[in-house]
């Protein structure tokens, strides 16, 4: 199995940590890339001895050239799969084409509700009683590709952003490593928008 994974992250990197701690995914994480020099995710990668790369968006004149710089990092580390874990930038068409069907994203709401950069805040403001987390394959539209996994999280009467975000994170740390595992083990079957997750690793007979 060639499952070399790059994790793209802009923030503190708790989901990166969950991926690196996963017994299947962890050993395959060969690169952590961030658009923020001070991202905690880069620190976490270094602490693990995983190459940590900052690609500075300010160094590139437009999104396409930033995108090409990211793509060239992925290629130079022989990356086969990309897991976005709190990466707050939209990937461009060239990169999407190069990694079609092999990029997964994590979103802190039950898509298609509350897409965008503020999934937790928007769910609270709307007054929904249940929100959650989504792992989905990435396509050219924001927070839109076929859904791999979701977990519901209740919104409690006294929740504020911090308390809800904390439970959202707990759900993410449970759900996302399983979804990334299914991707890298070749267990996803996509028909249109619908993703079936196989329990058996193709060609091995091994059950997860
Ligand atoms: C996660 O909650 C993730 O769902 C969210 O950023 C957070 C990163 O946390 N992603 C988005 O909002 C993408 N639209 P982390 O740095 O602790 O993993």
Image (cartoon, grey):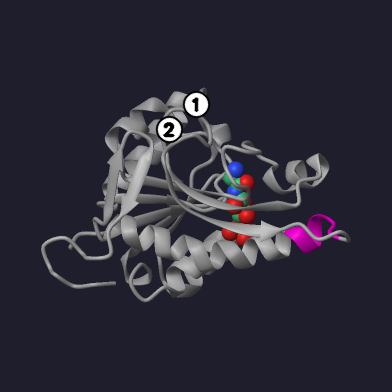
Image point 44% across, 64% down: which residue?
A: 177
Image point 50% across, 69% down: which residue?
A: 18
Mark-to-mark CA distance, 1 and 2: 6 Å
Image point 37% across, 41% down: which residue?
A: 194
Rendered location of residue 30, percent (x, y): 34, 61
In the displayed structure, 182 sits above or below 137; it is below
Rendered location of residue 32, percent (x, y): 44, 57
Quarter containing the N terminus = bottom left
Which segment did they paint magenta?
159-164
Rendered location of residue 12, percent (x, y): 63, 60
Q: Quadrant of residue 152?
A: bottom right
- Label drawn at residue 63: 1
Residue 39 visible: no
Reading the image, the residue beneath label 2 is 67
Asked whether the beta carbons under mark 1 and mark 2 sit within 8 Å of each other, the answer is yes
Quarter containing the C terminus = bottom left
Please check the rendered image and state whether residue 167 is part of the magenta-colored stretch, yes or no. Answer: no
User: Tag count in the figure?
Assistant: 2
In the displayed structure, 133 sits above or below 45; it is above
Q: Is residue 134 left or right of residue 179?
A: right
The front one of 33 and 119 is 119
The front one of 89 and 59 is 89
The front one of 145 and 156 is 156
Is the residue at mark 1 in contact range of ligand 1, meaning its CB lies under 8 Å from it? Answer: no
Q: Is residue 58 left or right of residue 64?
A: right
Please check the rendered image and state whether residue 163 is part of the magenta-colored stretch, yes or no. Answer: yes
Q: Which residue of the protein is positioned furthest toward the right in this rendering?
A: 158
């Amino acid at each position: 199995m060639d499952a070399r994974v790059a994790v793209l992250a802009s923030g503190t990197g708790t989901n990166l940590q969950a991926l690196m701690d996963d017994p299947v995914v962890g050993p395959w994480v060969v690169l952590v890339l961030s658009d923020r020099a001070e991202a905690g995710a880069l620190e976490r990668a270094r602490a693990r001895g995983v190459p940590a790369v900052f690609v500075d968006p300010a160094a590139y004149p437009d999104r396409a050239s930033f995108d090409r710089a990211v793509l060239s990092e992925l290629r130079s580390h022989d990356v086969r799969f990309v897991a976005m874990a709190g990466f707050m930038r939209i990937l461009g068409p060239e990169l999407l084409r190069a990694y079609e069907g092999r990029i997964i994203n994590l979103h802190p709401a039950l898509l298609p509700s509350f897409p965008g950069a503020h999934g937790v805040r928007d769910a609270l403001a709307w007054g929904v009683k249940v929100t959650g987390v989504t792992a989905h394959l990435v396509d050219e539209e924001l927070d839109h590709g076929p859904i791999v996994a979701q977990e519901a999280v209740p919104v409690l009467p006294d929740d504020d952003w911090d308390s809800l975000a904390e439970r959202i994170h707990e759900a993410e740390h449970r759900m996302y490593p399983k979804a990334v595992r299914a991707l890298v083990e070749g267990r996803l079957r996509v028909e249109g928008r619908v993703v079936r997750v196989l329990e058996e690793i193709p060609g091995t007979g091994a059950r997860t």
